[in-house]
Amino acid sequence: MARFSLVVLCSGRGSNLQALIDASHSGTLPADVVAVCSDRPDCAALARARDAGIAVRAMRPRDFVDRAAFDRALFAEAAQFAPDLIVLAGFMRILDPAVVGQWRGRMINIHPSLLPKYPGLRTHERALDAGDAEHGASVHFVTAELDGGPVIAQVALPVLADDTPASLAARLLPLEHRLLVATTRLIVDGDIVLDGDHVVRNGRPLPAPLRLHADGELG
Ligand code: GAR
């Protein structure tokens, strides 16, 4: 049987993409990254994909009349690879609702906050400004609301007295990688689906997002 296929959308560094590629290669994630699509033709994520022999597609938003036209074109490219799941891994654009609707339940995003706290940008700075004792990251199904779709799983870490946005981001990033791989794995295994507005695990709605534990398990 063909392996579960992923198309990953990225705008920048691509470290979360790399975690998916590495997990795919090591067998931790029984899925293949079949293509990487981007709104930034020069981004490091595309170089990582090329290095791994993965197909890349990139287009510039300024070459399209509006957001909807760009999103239609980018997602048409993604659809050519017939992915089982689209993963937004550092894809820094707000999506057109029509495109989001077409991929409902088949598209996830990783966001660097404990949603519903801090959708949007500057999440680390906002957590520090608020005096939060803990911070973290979330993986959620993508809906039309920015960073607002049903949350599948989260990872948390304590905020330290001398943390800066940069130090917090640096400590969180490796946890993001583990969270994204572990959550994607649950979807690949068929354990997690979106049913209406609910995340369902093995037939039962999740009462709260799963948490990534130190042993790497989600529970
Ligand atoms: C990650 O921290 C991810 O959570 C964040 O961008 C970074 C991408 O890093 N995503 C968002 O802020 C989406 N709203 P990466 O390119 O090294 O994976």
Image (tube, helix red, strand yellow):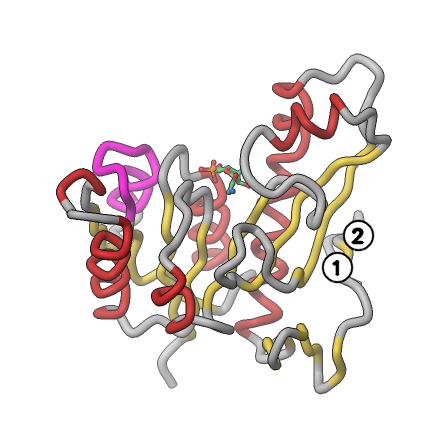
Residue, disc 2:
213
**What range of the chain is rendered magenta?**
38-51
Label 2 neighbour load within 10 Å: few <14, some 14-19, many 20+: few
Residue, disc 1:
217
- Image quadrant occupied by the C terminus: bottom right
In the rendered image, residue 153 lying in the magenta stretch gets the answer no
* Disc 2 residue type (three-letter): His
Q: CA distance from mark 2 to mark 1?
A: 6 Å
The image shows residue 209 at horizontal and vertical percentages of: 75, 61
Which residue is nearer to you in this view: 101 or 216? 101
Q: Residue at x 63, y 32 (%)?
A: 123
Residues at discs 2 and 1 in contact (Cβ within 8 Å): yes
The image shows residue 186 at horizontal and vertical percentages of: 62, 70
> Could you say which quadrant of the image residue 202 lies in?
bottom right
Q: Residue at x 60, y 80 (%)?
A: 196
> Could you say which quadrant of the image residue 31 lies in?
bottom left
The image shows residue 122 at horizontal and vertical percentages of: 58, 28
Q: Residue furthest top?
A: 162
190 vs 138: above or below = below
> Could you say which quadrant of the image residue 203 lies in?
bottom right
Residue 27 is at least partly visible in this image: no
63 vs 1: above or below = above
Secondary structure, mark 1, is loop
